[in-house]
Image (tube, helix red, strand yellow):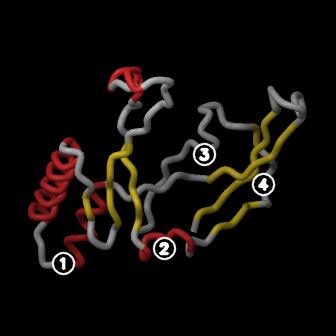
Amino acid sequence: MIEFEIKSRVLTIGERKGGTAYYASPKSKQKLTNRLLVERIVRETSLSEGDVKNALISLSNVVCEALQMGMSVDLAELGSLRLVVNSKMMETPEQVTVKDALKAPKISFTPKQKMRDAASNVELSIDRNKPVSSGDTDGDGGGDDDGGSPL
């Protein structure tokens, strides 16, 4: 479950400049750390902690190498990774160069149905029992607590 709190912020631009807007912000950003991930995999498989760590490091190395070669990577039930390189529109073919037309490569992740289902089935709630707090100062629209993982 992701629990949200209501925050407010004074708008600085647009038609509603000077007015107050309210928004939902996650109370905490829970994270499944690498250590917890390794522990969970060890519990659910016959692999040792060292085996799991080595597999994750090897997976990282293989994925990075494949991406550097411009390949997409199928991560089985997780989904797939691929590079996306957008291009600016130019007026002549001669202007279309790596330096001028191509933007920096970005990694795109496309989750498989199982992951999309997990995301769409997460329970969301808004805590209305606390006073509205002022907007965050880090500009991310979220809470500042990294919180622990219930896993």
Structural crowding at the residue carrying mark 3, measured as other residues with C-alpha within 10 Å and reported as few (<14), some (14–19) or many (≥20): many
Which percent across, then down, holds residue 138? 59, 32
Residue at (15% x, 58% y) in the render: 53
> Decide: marks 1, 3 in contact (CB < 8 A)?
no
At label 2, the amino acid type is Ala
- 10 lies above or below 24: above
Q: Quadrant of the C terminus?
A: bottom left
Say whether disc 2 or disc 3 marks the residue closer to the N-terminus. 2
Q: Write down the residue under mark 2.
A: 118
Q: Write down the residue under mark 4.
A: 130
At label 4, the amino acid type is Lys
Which percent across, then down, holds residue 119? 52, 68
Q: Write down the residue under mark 1.
A: 45
Mark 4 and mark 3: span between their CA atoms? 15 Å
Q: Nearer the viewer, residue 131 or 91?
A: 91
Mark 1 and mark 2: span between their CA atoms? 21 Å
At label 3, the amino acid type is Gly
Which percent across, then down, holds residue 147? 49, 53
Say whether disc 2 or disc 4 marks the residue closer to the N-terminus. 2
Mark 2 and mark 4: span between their CA atoms? 29 Å
At label 1, the amino acid type is Thr
Q: Write down the residue under mark 3.
A: 143
Residue at (75% x, 45% y) in the render: 7
Mark 4 and mark 1: span between their CA atoms? 43 Å
- 73 lies above or below 89: below
